[in-house]
Amino acid sequence: MARIVMKFGGTSVADLDRIKNVARHVKREVDAGHEVAVVVSAMSGKTNELVGWVQGTPKVVGANSPFYDAREYDAVVASGEQVTSGLLAIALQAMDINARSWQGWQIPIRTDNAHGAARILEIDGSDIIKRMGEGQVAVIAGFQGLGPDNRIATLGRGGSDTSAVAIAAAVKADRCDIYTDVDGVYTTDPRIVPQARRLKKIAFEEMLEMASLGAKVLQVRSVELAMVHKVRTFVRSSFEDPDAPGMGDLLNPPGTLICDEDEIVEQEVVTGIAYAKDEAQISLRRLADRPGVSAAIFGPLAESHINVDMIVQNISEDGSKTDMTFTVPSGDVDKAIKVLGENKEKIGYDVVQNESGLVKVSVIGIGMRSHAGVAATAFKALADKGINIKAITTSEIKISILIDGPYAELAVRTLHSCYGLDKN
Ligand code: ASP
Ligand code: MG
Protein backbone atom coordinates (compact mmCIF):
# COMPACT_ATOMS: atom_id res chain seq x y z
CA MET A 1 0.00 0.00 0.00
CA ALA A 2 1.19 3.49 -0.82
CA ARG A 3 0.07 7.05 -0.32
CA ILE A 4 -0.40 8.85 -3.62
CA VAL A 5 -1.22 12.43 -4.56
CA MET A 6 -2.83 12.69 -8.01
CA LYS A 7 -3.09 16.08 -9.69
CA PHE A 8 -5.29 16.75 -12.72
CA GLY A 9 -4.82 19.84 -14.89
CA GLY A 10 -7.41 21.93 -16.68
CA THR A 11 -7.70 19.86 -19.87
CA SER A 12 -8.11 16.72 -17.75
CA VAL A 13 -11.18 18.16 -16.00
CA ALA A 14 -12.45 20.21 -18.95
CA ASP A 15 -16.03 18.87 -18.84
CA LEU A 16 -18.20 16.31 -17.03
CA ASP A 17 -17.06 13.43 -19.24
CA ARG A 18 -13.42 14.22 -18.60
CA ILE A 19 -14.16 14.46 -14.86
CA LYS A 20 -15.74 10.99 -14.99
CA ASN A 21 -12.62 9.76 -16.73
CA VAL A 22 -10.51 11.27 -13.93
CA ALA A 23 -12.68 9.47 -11.41
CA ARG A 24 -11.75 6.18 -13.12
CA HIS A 25 -8.05 6.99 -12.71
CA VAL A 26 -8.68 7.64 -9.03
CA LYS A 27 -10.75 4.47 -8.65
CA ARG A 28 -7.90 2.41 -10.08
CA GLU A 29 -5.56 3.55 -7.31
CA VAL A 30 -8.21 3.24 -4.60
CA ASP A 31 -9.04 -0.29 -5.72
CA ALA A 32 -5.35 -1.16 -5.52
CA GLY A 33 -5.54 -0.30 -1.81
CA HIS A 34 -3.66 3.01 -1.87
CA GLU A 35 -4.43 6.10 0.15
CA VAL A 36 -5.28 8.85 -2.30
CA ALA A 37 -5.45 12.64 -2.26
CA VAL A 38 -6.43 14.38 -5.49
CA VAL A 39 -5.63 17.97 -6.46
CA VAL A 40 -7.59 19.59 -9.27
CA SER A 41 -7.23 22.64 -11.50
CA ALA A 42 -10.16 24.61 -12.85
CA MET A 43 -11.73 23.48 -16.13
CA SER A 44 -9.46 24.60 -18.96
CA GLY A 45 -10.16 28.17 -20.01
CA LYS A 46 -12.07 28.89 -16.81
CA THR A 47 -9.33 30.79 -15.00
CA ASN A 48 -8.72 32.94 -18.08
CA GLU A 49 -12.41 33.75 -18.17
CA LEU A 50 -12.45 34.66 -14.47
CA VAL A 51 -9.34 36.83 -14.84
CA GLY A 52 -11.00 38.53 -17.81
CA TRP A 53 -14.06 39.31 -15.72
CA VAL A 54 -11.93 40.89 -13.02
CA GLN A 55 -10.05 42.95 -15.58
CA GLY A 56 -13.32 44.06 -17.16
CA THR A 57 -14.75 45.52 -13.97
CA PRO A 58 -14.73 49.29 -13.44
CA LYS A 59 -11.45 50.42 -11.94
CA VAL A 60 -11.72 51.61 -8.38
CA VAL A 61 -8.50 53.58 -8.12
CA GLY A 62 -8.91 56.21 -10.83
CA ALA A 63 -10.21 55.57 -14.32
CA ASN A 64 -6.91 54.70 -15.99
CA SER A 65 -5.42 52.64 -13.23
CA PRO A 66 -4.74 49.00 -14.08
CA PHE A 67 -5.12 48.10 -10.40
CA TYR A 68 -7.87 46.30 -8.63
CA ASP A 69 -8.10 44.81 -5.19
CA ALA A 70 -5.93 41.68 -5.40
CA ARG A 71 -7.88 40.05 -2.56
CA GLU A 72 -11.06 40.26 -4.61
CA TYR A 73 -9.18 39.00 -7.67
CA ASP A 74 -8.30 35.94 -5.59
CA ALA A 75 -11.90 35.56 -4.38
CA VAL A 76 -13.01 35.42 -8.01
CA VAL A 77 -10.28 33.36 -9.70
CA ALA A 78 -10.09 30.71 -6.93
CA SER A 79 -13.68 29.74 -7.70
CA GLY A 80 -12.78 27.63 -10.73
CA GLU A 81 -11.05 25.04 -8.55
CA GLN A 82 -13.86 25.06 -6.02
CA VAL A 83 -16.22 23.91 -8.78
CA THR A 84 -14.03 21.06 -10.08
CA SER A 85 -13.21 19.76 -6.60
CA GLY A 86 -16.90 19.43 -5.81
CA LEU A 87 -17.76 17.90 -9.18
CA LEU A 88 -15.00 15.30 -8.90
CA ALA A 89 -16.07 14.37 -5.35
CA ILE A 90 -19.61 13.83 -6.68
CA ALA A 91 -18.33 11.74 -9.60
CA LEU A 92 -16.34 9.58 -7.19
CA GLN A 93 -19.29 9.12 -4.86
CA ALA A 94 -21.34 8.03 -7.87
CA MET A 95 -18.80 5.23 -8.32
CA ASP A 96 -19.22 4.21 -4.68
CA ILE A 97 -15.97 5.76 -3.60
CA ASN A 98 -15.88 7.57 -0.29
CA ALA A 99 -14.71 11.08 -1.19
CA ARG A 100 -15.07 14.71 -0.13
CA SER A 101 -13.88 18.05 -1.44
CA TRP A 102 -11.51 20.35 0.44
CA GLN A 103 -10.96 24.04 -0.20
CA GLY A 104 -7.56 25.51 0.61
CA TRP A 105 -8.88 27.28 3.74
CA GLN A 106 -10.41 24.09 5.12
CA ILE A 107 -7.15 22.16 5.32
CA PRO A 108 -5.69 24.81 5.83
CA ILE A 109 -2.99 25.62 3.30
CA ARG A 110 -1.36 28.71 4.79
CA THR A 111 0.18 31.21 2.42
CA ASP A 112 1.88 34.58 2.63
CA ASN A 113 0.08 37.80 1.88
CA ALA A 114 1.09 38.20 -1.78
CA HIS A 115 -2.42 37.94 -3.20
CA GLY A 116 -2.38 36.74 -6.79
CA ALA A 117 1.08 35.19 -6.47
CA ALA A 118 1.15 33.86 -2.93
CA ARG A 119 3.69 31.34 -1.63
CA ILE A 120 2.71 28.40 0.50
CA LEU A 121 4.10 28.73 4.02
CA GLU A 122 2.64 25.73 5.79
CA ILE A 123 0.16 22.94 5.28
CA ASP A 124 -1.48 21.10 8.11
CA GLY A 125 -1.82 17.62 6.62
CA SER A 126 -3.21 15.96 9.75
CA ASP A 127 -6.92 15.98 8.88
CA ILE A 128 -6.28 14.68 5.41
CA ILE A 129 -3.95 11.96 6.64
CA LYS A 130 -6.58 10.88 9.15
CA ARG A 131 -9.35 10.78 6.53
CA MET A 132 -7.18 8.96 4.02
CA GLY A 133 -6.43 6.41 6.74
CA GLU A 134 -10.20 5.89 7.08
CA GLY A 135 -10.43 5.18 3.36
CA GLN A 136 -11.72 8.57 2.24
CA VAL A 137 -10.36 10.24 -0.88
CA ALA A 138 -9.50 13.91 -0.35
CA VAL A 139 -10.34 16.01 -3.41
CA ILE A 140 -8.46 19.26 -2.95
CA ALA A 141 -8.95 22.52 -4.85
CA GLY A 142 -5.53 23.46 -6.23
CA PHE A 143 -4.17 26.98 -6.79
CA GLN A 144 -5.54 28.36 -3.51
CA GLY A 145 -4.73 28.78 0.15
CA LEU A 146 -5.47 31.01 3.09
CA GLY A 147 -3.52 34.24 3.60
CA PRO A 148 -2.50 35.70 6.98
CA ASP A 149 -5.40 38.13 6.55
CA ASN A 150 -7.72 35.11 6.68
CA ARG A 151 -8.72 35.57 3.05
CA ILE A 152 -8.35 33.31 0.00
CA ALA A 153 -4.98 33.68 -1.71
CA THR A 154 -4.03 32.18 -5.09
CA LEU A 155 -0.60 30.89 -5.99
CA GLY A 156 -0.01 32.44 -9.42
CA ARG A 157 -0.97 30.99 -12.81
CA GLY A 158 -0.26 27.29 -13.07
CA GLY A 159 -0.19 27.12 -9.27
CA SER A 160 -2.12 23.89 -8.83
CA ASP A 161 1.08 21.97 -9.69
CA THR A 162 2.61 23.66 -6.67
CA SER A 163 -0.43 22.82 -4.53
CA ALA A 164 -0.02 19.16 -5.46
CA VAL A 165 3.68 18.92 -4.70
CA ALA A 166 3.29 20.85 -1.45
CA ILE A 167 0.47 18.57 -0.33
CA ALA A 168 2.50 15.50 -1.30
CA ALA A 169 5.32 16.79 0.91
CA ALA A 170 2.92 17.63 3.76
CA VAL A 171 1.26 14.22 3.84
CA LYS A 172 4.56 12.43 3.12
CA ALA A 173 3.20 10.83 -0.02
CA ASP A 174 5.22 8.13 -1.73
CA ARG A 175 4.53 9.73 -5.06
CA CYS A 176 2.99 12.79 -6.68
CA ASP A 177 1.43 12.10 -10.08
CA ILE A 178 0.84 15.14 -12.27
CA TYR A 179 -1.74 14.12 -14.89
CA THR A 180 -1.83 16.38 -17.91
CA ASP A 181 -2.53 16.37 -21.65
CA VAL A 182 0.94 15.15 -22.60
CA ASP A 183 2.34 11.77 -21.63
CA GLY A 184 5.56 12.99 -20.06
CA VAL A 185 8.51 15.33 -20.34
CA TYR A 186 10.19 15.33 -23.74
CA THR A 187 13.77 16.06 -24.79
CA THR A 188 12.31 19.15 -26.44
CA ASP A 189 8.99 20.48 -27.72
CA PRO A 190 7.63 17.69 -30.00
CA ARG A 191 5.66 20.27 -32.00
CA ILE A 192 8.98 21.63 -33.24
CA VAL A 193 10.99 18.44 -33.29
CA PRO A 194 8.89 15.39 -34.11
CA GLN A 195 11.92 13.23 -33.24
CA ALA A 196 11.78 14.40 -29.62
CA ARG A 197 11.82 11.52 -27.16
CA ARG A 198 9.93 11.08 -23.95
CA LEU A 199 12.32 10.92 -21.02
CA LYS A 200 11.94 8.06 -18.57
CA LYS A 201 13.60 10.10 -15.84
CA ILE A 202 14.84 13.62 -15.41
CA ALA A 203 16.71 15.07 -12.42
CA PHE A 204 15.08 17.80 -10.32
CA GLU A 205 17.78 20.31 -11.29
CA GLU A 206 17.32 19.58 -14.98
CA MET A 207 13.55 19.87 -14.75
CA LEU A 208 13.95 23.16 -12.92
CA GLU A 209 16.05 24.50 -15.79
CA MET A 210 13.65 23.09 -18.40
CA ALA A 211 10.68 24.72 -16.66
CA SER A 212 12.34 28.08 -16.09
CA LEU A 213 13.81 28.16 -19.60
CA GLY A 214 10.52 27.81 -21.38
CA ALA A 215 9.18 24.23 -21.16
CA LYS A 216 5.63 24.68 -19.95
CA VAL A 217 4.86 21.29 -18.43
CA LEU A 218 5.08 22.31 -14.77
CA GLN A 219 5.00 25.52 -12.79
CA VAL A 220 8.59 26.40 -11.87
CA ARG A 221 7.81 26.71 -8.18
CA SER A 222 6.39 23.20 -8.06
CA VAL A 223 9.72 21.83 -9.29
CA GLU A 224 11.62 23.86 -6.68
CA LEU A 225 9.40 22.41 -3.99
CA ALA A 226 9.73 18.87 -5.31
CA MET A 227 13.50 19.29 -5.28
CA VAL A 228 13.65 20.66 -1.73
CA HIS A 229 11.33 18.02 -0.30
CA LYS A 230 12.52 15.23 -2.59
CA VAL A 231 9.00 14.46 -3.78
CA ARG A 232 9.15 11.80 -6.48
CA THR A 233 6.97 13.36 -9.15
CA PHE A 234 5.58 11.69 -12.24
CA VAL A 235 4.33 13.61 -15.26
CA ARG A 236 1.81 11.41 -17.06
CA SER A 237 -1.27 11.56 -19.27
CA SER A 238 -4.89 11.52 -18.12
CA PHE A 239 -5.95 10.83 -21.70
CA GLU A 240 -4.84 7.21 -21.70
CA ASP A 241 -7.35 4.52 -20.80
CA PRO A 242 -7.35 4.50 -16.99
CA ASP A 243 -7.42 0.71 -16.98
CA ALA A 244 -4.83 0.01 -19.68
CA PRO A 245 -2.11 -2.43 -18.64
CA GLY A 246 0.64 -0.85 -16.57
CA MET A 247 -1.33 2.27 -15.64
CA GLY A 248 -1.48 1.18 -12.01
CA ASP A 249 2.18 0.10 -11.82
CA LEU A 250 3.41 1.34 -8.45
CA LEU A 251 7.09 1.66 -9.29
CA ASN A 252 7.12 2.31 -13.03
CA PRO A 253 3.92 3.91 -14.22
CA PRO A 254 3.98 5.30 -17.77
CA GLY A 255 5.30 8.85 -17.90
CA THR A 256 8.40 10.74 -16.82
CA LEU A 257 9.77 10.53 -13.30
CA ILE A 258 11.31 13.70 -11.88
CA CYS A 259 13.69 12.52 -9.24
CA ASP A 260 17.02 12.81 -7.50
CA GLU A 261 19.96 12.56 -9.86
CA ASP A 262 21.29 9.54 -7.92
CA GLU A 263 18.31 7.59 -9.22
CA ILE A 264 19.37 8.15 -12.81
CA VAL A 265 21.85 5.46 -13.68
CA GLU A 266 22.51 6.10 -17.34
CA GLN A 267 23.04 9.84 -17.35
CA GLU A 268 23.32 11.35 -20.83
CA VAL A 269 25.54 14.41 -21.25
CA VAL A 270 22.62 16.46 -22.54
CA THR A 271 19.06 15.78 -21.40
CA GLY A 272 17.00 18.34 -23.26
CA ILE A 273 16.71 21.54 -25.28
CA ALA A 274 14.42 24.35 -24.13
CA TYR A 275 13.56 27.65 -25.74
CA ALA A 276 11.97 30.90 -24.67
CA LYS A 277 10.49 33.30 -27.20
CA ASP A 278 9.98 37.05 -27.03
CA GLU A 279 13.25 38.01 -25.47
CA ALA A 280 14.73 41.44 -26.00
CA GLN A 281 18.27 42.66 -25.69
CA ILE A 282 19.25 46.02 -24.26
CA SER A 283 22.78 47.41 -24.51
CA LEU A 284 24.25 50.35 -22.65
CA ARG A 285 27.25 51.77 -24.47
CA ARG A 286 30.30 53.43 -22.99
CA LEU A 287 29.47 53.11 -19.34
CA ALA A 288 31.88 54.33 -16.71
CA ASP A 289 33.80 51.27 -15.53
CA ARG A 290 33.62 51.80 -11.78
CA PRO A 291 32.18 50.13 -8.69
CA GLY A 292 28.42 50.58 -8.43
CA VAL A 293 27.41 50.80 -12.11
CA SER A 294 25.70 47.40 -12.13
CA ALA A 295 23.81 48.31 -8.99
CA ALA A 296 22.83 51.63 -10.56
CA ILE A 297 21.43 49.81 -13.62
CA PHE A 298 19.77 46.76 -12.15
CA GLY A 299 18.51 48.26 -8.90
CA PRO A 300 15.96 50.57 -10.55
CA LEU A 301 14.98 47.84 -13.04
CA ALA A 302 14.29 45.44 -10.18
CA GLU A 303 12.26 48.08 -8.36
CA SER A 304 10.13 48.38 -11.49
CA HIS A 305 9.61 44.58 -11.43
CA ILE A 306 11.49 44.06 -14.68
CA ASN A 307 12.85 40.57 -14.85
CA VAL A 308 16.41 40.71 -16.16
CA ASP A 309 17.84 37.46 -17.47
CA MET A 310 21.15 37.15 -19.30
CA ILE A 311 23.76 39.79 -18.39
CA VAL A 312 26.95 40.29 -20.34
CA GLN A 313 29.54 42.90 -19.44
CA ASN A 314 32.60 43.59 -21.53
CA ILE A 315 36.02 43.89 -20.00
CA SER A 316 36.96 47.45 -20.81
CA GLU A 317 40.02 48.04 -22.92
CA ASP A 318 41.51 50.88 -20.93
CA GLY A 319 39.75 50.50 -17.60
CA SER A 320 37.58 53.57 -18.06
CA LYS A 321 34.60 52.67 -20.28
CA THR A 322 32.71 49.45 -20.81
CA ASP A 323 29.53 48.06 -22.44
CA MET A 324 26.72 46.19 -20.71
CA THR A 325 24.16 44.02 -22.48
CA PHE A 326 21.24 42.20 -20.88
CA THR A 327 17.94 40.62 -21.82
CA VAL A 328 14.38 41.23 -20.62
CA PRO A 329 11.02 39.89 -21.86
CA SER A 330 10.03 41.81 -25.02
CA GLY A 331 6.94 43.15 -23.25
CA ASP A 332 9.13 44.95 -20.72
CA VAL A 333 11.45 46.77 -23.16
CA ASP A 334 9.62 50.10 -23.22
CA LYS A 335 9.37 50.17 -19.46
CA ALA A 336 13.07 49.27 -19.13
CA ILE A 337 14.18 51.96 -21.58
CA LYS A 338 12.12 54.48 -19.66
CA VAL A 339 13.64 53.48 -16.33
CA LEU A 340 17.15 53.60 -17.81
CA GLY A 341 16.42 57.05 -19.26
CA GLU A 342 15.30 58.34 -15.88
CA ASN A 343 18.53 57.10 -14.35
CA LYS A 344 20.90 58.14 -17.13
CA GLU A 345 22.84 60.64 -15.02
CA LYS A 346 23.29 58.24 -12.15
CA ILE A 347 24.36 55.32 -14.35
CA GLY A 348 26.50 57.40 -16.66
CA TYR A 349 26.18 55.78 -20.09
CA ASP A 350 26.41 57.21 -23.56
CA VAL A 351 23.65 55.53 -25.57
CA VAL A 352 21.15 52.76 -25.05
CA GLN A 353 20.27 50.34 -27.87
CA ASN A 354 17.66 47.63 -27.96
CA GLU A 355 16.39 44.82 -30.13
CA SER A 356 13.25 42.72 -29.67
CA GLY A 357 11.96 39.47 -31.11
CA LEU A 358 14.89 37.35 -29.97
CA VAL A 359 14.84 33.78 -28.76
CA LYS A 360 16.86 32.05 -26.09
CA VAL A 361 17.66 28.41 -26.74
CA SER A 362 19.13 26.37 -23.93
CA VAL A 363 20.98 23.08 -23.74
CA ILE A 364 20.42 21.33 -20.41
CA GLY A 365 22.07 18.33 -18.80
CA ILE A 366 23.61 17.37 -15.49
CA GLY A 367 26.11 15.29 -17.44
CA MET A 368 27.84 18.42 -18.73
CA ARG A 369 29.29 18.99 -15.26
CA SER A 370 31.78 16.24 -16.01
CA HIS A 371 32.19 16.59 -19.78
CA ALA A 372 34.30 19.05 -21.73
CA GLY A 373 33.36 20.42 -25.14
CA VAL A 374 29.60 20.48 -24.73
CA ALA A 375 29.36 24.20 -25.49
CA ALA A 376 31.78 23.99 -28.40
CA THR A 377 29.57 21.33 -30.01
CA ALA A 378 26.58 23.68 -29.88
CA PHE A 379 28.51 26.63 -31.28
CA LYS A 380 29.85 24.60 -34.18
CA ALA A 381 26.46 23.11 -35.03
CA LEU A 382 24.81 26.55 -35.03
CA ALA A 383 27.64 28.03 -37.09
CA ASP A 384 27.24 25.28 -39.69
CA LYS A 385 23.63 26.38 -40.12
CA GLY A 386 24.64 30.04 -40.39
CA ILE A 387 22.92 30.99 -37.13
CA ASN A 388 24.45 34.02 -35.46
CA ILE A 389 24.89 34.02 -31.69
CA LYS A 390 24.12 37.30 -29.92
CA ALA A 391 24.85 36.38 -26.31
CA ILE A 392 25.79 33.32 -24.29
CA THR A 393 25.40 32.45 -20.64
CA THR A 394 26.32 29.20 -18.96
CA SER A 395 25.92 27.45 -15.66
CA GLU A 396 27.17 24.06 -14.51
CA ILE A 397 24.28 22.28 -16.17
CA LYS A 398 23.09 24.58 -18.95
CA ILE A 399 24.18 26.69 -21.88
CA SER A 400 21.83 29.45 -23.01
CA ILE A 401 22.25 31.08 -26.40
CA LEU A 402 20.46 34.19 -27.64
CA ILE A 403 19.63 34.26 -31.35
CA ASP A 404 17.35 36.04 -33.82
CA GLY A 405 13.70 34.93 -33.57
CA PRO A 406 13.28 33.53 -37.10
CA TYR A 407 16.05 30.99 -36.43
CA ALA A 408 14.42 29.53 -33.31
CA GLU A 409 13.04 26.32 -34.78
CA LEU A 410 16.12 25.61 -36.85
CA ALA A 411 18.31 26.14 -33.79
CA VAL A 412 16.23 23.85 -31.58
CA ARG A 413 16.27 21.13 -34.24
CA THR A 414 19.98 21.53 -34.84
CA LEU A 415 20.88 21.33 -31.16
CA HIS A 416 18.53 18.42 -30.58
CA SER A 417 20.19 16.36 -33.24
CA CYS A 418 23.81 17.40 -32.60
CA TYR A 419 23.65 15.88 -29.11
CA GLY A 420 22.10 12.69 -30.45
CA LEU A 421 18.71 13.28 -28.84
CA ASP A 422 16.64 12.45 -31.94
CA LYS A 423 14.86 9.16 -31.61
CA ASN A 424 15.92 6.55 -34.13
N1 ASP B 1 -6.38 27.22 -12.82
C1 ASP B 1 -5.15 27.92 -12.54
C2 ASP B 1 -4.57 28.49 -13.81
O1 ASP B 1 -5.13 28.33 -14.88
C3 ASP B 1 -4.17 27.06 -11.82
C4 ASP B 1 -3.69 25.85 -12.60
O2 ASP B 1 -4.33 25.40 -13.54
O3 ASP B 1 -2.65 25.32 -12.24
O4 ASP B 1 -3.55 29.13 -13.76
MG1 MG C 1 -0.80 23.60 -15.62
Image: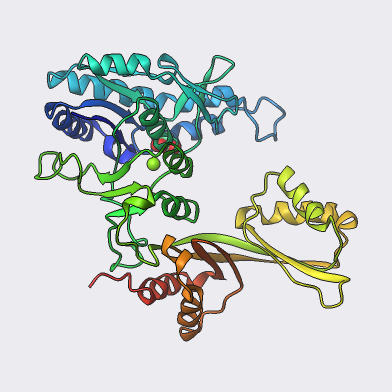
Q: Nearer the viewer, residue 258 or 140?
A: 258
The quadrant of the image that shows the C terminus is bottom left
Q: Quadrant of residue 309?
A: bottom right
In the picture, measured across the screen, residue 356 lies left or right of residue 19, that is right
Q: Residue at x 30, y 44 (%)?
A: 234
Q: How is the image coloured?
A: rainbow
Q: Nearer the viewer, residue 102 or 333?
A: 102
Q: Nearer the viewer, residue 166 or 140?
A: 166
Q: Quadrant of residue 323?
A: bottom right
| Residue 183, horizontal then vertical, whole percent | 25, 50
Q: Nearer the viewer, residue 371 or 335?
A: 371
In the picture, measured across the screen, residue 338 lies left or right of residue 2, that is right
In the picture, measured across the screen, residue 166 lies left or right of residue 84, that is right
| Residue 21, horizontal then vertical, whole percent | 18, 34
In the image, residue 398 sits, relative to residue 378, either above or below, namely above
In the image, residue 334 sits, relative to residue 405, either above or below, namely above
- Total labels drawn: 0
| Residue 211, horizontal then vertical, whole percent | 45, 51
Ligand 2 placement by image quarter:
top left
| Residue 128, horizontal then vertical, whole percent | 33, 17
Q: Residue at x 61, y 53 (%)?
A: 331
In the image, residue 214 sits, relative to residue 250, either above or below, namely below
The quadrant of the image that shows the N terminus is top left
In the picture, measured across the screen, residue 341 lies left or right of residue 40, that is right
- Residue at the extreme right: 345
